[in-house]
Image (cartoon, rainbow, N blue to C red):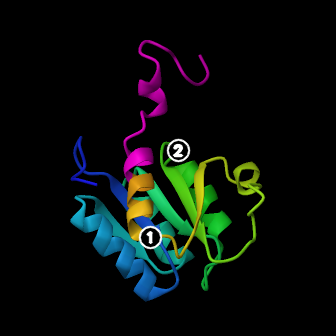
Amino acid sequence: MAEWTHGPVHALIVESEPNLGWLWKRHLDRMGCETCLAHGQDAAIAYLQRVPFDVVVLDLVLEHGSALAVSDFACYRQPDAKVIFVTNTRFFSDGSIFQHACNACALMHSDAPASDLAALVEHYGKAPKLEHAVPGARHGSE
């Protein structure tokens, strides 16, 4: 995959395993993504309060905190941000994560190649935002 095509994607990685988080961050950074890395719920919430993101890469099993709490906060604070869930377990392998997290856009195994994750980040990071999806359309209550 070449460089991002329409400016940088802003991504937050929330991963308890530091080596894996840094691997993903370095890969996304090399591809032109602007990336922040948090190792738990508190740090992720702090980033979501201060920095706008297009995509959140979120490990379903965090050592410190709850991935679903981070996802819910992202939905509230940054409703256009898409969440790519990653896991090294079979939990939610039935696809039910999409019923529990309204901002979930993908679920992948955490040992998938970093290039696969980068492709998903680019795809969902460049997806049209709700207010731009239909020109002239009004969203929300009138």
Most foreground residue, 3 or 138? 3
Query: Residue 107 appears at what percent x and percent y?
Result: 61, 59
Q: How far is mark 1 from mark 2, CA to CA?
A: 28 Å
**Mark 1 nearby-residue class (10 Å; few <14, some 14–19, many ≥20):** few
Q: Position of residue 64 (x, y in %)?
A: 60, 84
Which residue is the site of mark 2?
A: 79
Q: Which residues are magenta?
A: 122-142
Residue displayed at 45% across by 53% down? 120
Query: Residue 53, can we see it?
Result: no
Magenta region, main secondary structure:
loop
Q: Residue at x 28, y 59 (%)?
A: 33
Q: x, y (%) of residue 6? A: 24, 41
**Helix, strand, or loop for circle 2?**
loop
The residue lying at 40 percent from left, 54 percent from top is 119
Q: Quadrant of residue 63?
A: bottom right
Q: Nearer the viewer, residue 8 or 23?
A: 23
- Look at label 2 and name its amino acid: Pro
Task: State the SS at label 1.
Answer: loop
Which residue is at 69% across, 76% downward?
Answer: 89
Total of numbered circles in the picture?
Answer: 2
Q: Amino acid at mark 1?
A: Pro
Residue designated by label 1: 113
